């Protein structure tokens, strides 16, 4: 029975879980804005914001979009293109800002 | 669509839900390319206004809170439909659409004030990439609001019930995806300047 339900889409979280996730999302958003405004956090601003943003992203996807309980095939359909998009983003950033660009290599006598 | 007409794949999964997850996957690539473009051209504008001159963090933080709360309303609407409580389902569906409209109103205000301050699509690389990225997101929110209002009207007409829970769930998937895209945009565009 449980397997059949899992295959059909899985059990959804309770309303209480939805409310707790919302509370955590609000707290994380307040932390994000706080980190932005507090000068002490500026040396670690980017990693801190990336971690907080990733936590919010994961909470919404896992609980509100039900990927935590739904079929793993749905997670694959979402996760594979997401990873591809992230890989393209990282590759482009390396291409335009990395030390190993053709122009950068020429400047350092590597080309 | 009634429950009786739902088709399942050979994996036992709802075919509409599977197709919609594939669509969301393709949307990841679309927004991934737009966010990549924004980041690649970040800091390369030769004339102002620049992001730190013009972005209003307190205002956008309220918009972000608004969109997060709309996601909560959406899951509450789904839970209400699943338990057959159509009275509350109508309330939560309308609240989701209303918060979406507030977000859009905020975006229209933001875009208008930016144009008055000299930032347009043609002004510099920041303007071009910012308006294309956030404008594409705004277009998705607009589609979501129209979809939600359609569901709300169907609920008012008595044409939406527990048998249509999958329709509401798929609408929710779209809405939450719009929300997670904004979570990324808020961090990448507004907070990491």
Image: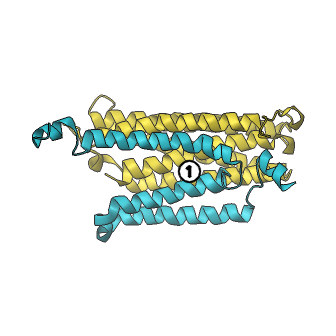
Chain colours: A cyan, B yellow
Please state the horizontal and vertical placement of residue B119, each as a whole percent of the image. 30, 36
| B116 lies left or right of B31 | left
Identify the residue at the far bottom of this view: A40
Chain for numbered disc 1: B
| A90 lies left or right of B106 | left
Please state the horizontal and vertical placement of residue B40, each as a whole percent of the image. 31, 39
Please state the horizontal and vertical placement of residue A105, each as a whole percent of the image. 16, 40
User: The C terminus of chain A appears in which quarter of the rendering?
Assistant: top left
Residues packed near mark 1 inside 10 Å, few (<14), some (14 to 19) or many (20 plus): many
Q: Is residue B69 above or below residue B134?
A: below
SS for callout 1 = helix
| B62 lies left or right of A11 | left
Identify the residue at the far front of this view: A110
Please state the horizontal and vertical placement of residue B16, each as a whole percent of the image. 73, 34
Residue at the image point whose x is 90% and y is 35% from the top: B4
Residue at the image point whose x is 79% and y is 53% from the top: B80
Query: Which residue is at the front of the view, B82 or A84?
Result: A84
Identify the residue at the far top of this view: B122
Query: Which residue is at the front of the view, B26 or A105?
Result: A105
User: The N terminus of chain A appears in which quarter of the rendering?
Assistant: bottom right
| B188 lies left or right of B50 | right
Tell me, yes or no, if residue B117 can be seen here: no
Total marks in image: 1
Task: Please name the residue that numbered disc 1 is placed on.
Answer: B67
Tell me, yes or no, if residue A31 can be seen here: yes
Residue at the image point whose x is 34% and y is 39% from the top: A92
């Amino acid at each position: 029975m449980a397997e059949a339900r899992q295959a059909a889409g899985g059990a959804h979280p309770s309303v209480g879980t939805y409310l707790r996730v919302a509370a955590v999302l609000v707290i994380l958003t307040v932390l994000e804005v706080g980190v932005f405004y507090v000068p002490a956090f500026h040396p670690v601003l980017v990693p801190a914001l990336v971690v907080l943003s990733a936590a919010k992203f994961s909470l919404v996807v896992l609980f509100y979009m039900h990927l935590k309980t739904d079929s793993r095939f749905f997670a694959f359909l979402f996760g594979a293109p997401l990873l591809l998009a992230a890989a393209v983003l990282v590759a482009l950033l390396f291409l335009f800002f990395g030390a190993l660009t053709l122009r950068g290599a020429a400047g350092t006598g590597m080309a | 669509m009634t429950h009786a007409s739902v088709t399942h794949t050979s994996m036992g999964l709802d075919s509409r839900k599977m197709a919609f997850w594939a669509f969301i996957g393709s949307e990841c690539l679309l927004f991934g390319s737009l966010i990549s473009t924004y980041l690649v051209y970040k800091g390369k504008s030769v004339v102002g206004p620049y992001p730190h001159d013009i972005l209003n963090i307190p205002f956008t933080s309220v918009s972000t809170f608004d969109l997060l709360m709309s996601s909560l309303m959406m899951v509450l609407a789904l839970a209400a439909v699943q338990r057959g409580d159509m009275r509350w389902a109508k309330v939560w569906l309308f609240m989701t659409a209303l918060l979406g409209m507030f977000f859009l109103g905020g975006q229209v205000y933001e875009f208008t004030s930016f144009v008055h301050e000299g930032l347009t699509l043609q002004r510099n690389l920041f303007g071009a990439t910012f308006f294309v990225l956030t404008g594409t997101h705004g277009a998705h929110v607009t589609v979501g609001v129209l979809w939600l209002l359609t569901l709300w009207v169907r609920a008012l007409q008595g044409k939406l019930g527990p048998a249509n829970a999958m329709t509401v769930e798929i609408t929710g998937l779209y809405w939450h995806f719009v929300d997670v895209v904004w979570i990324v945009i808020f961090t990448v565009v507004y907070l990491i300047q």
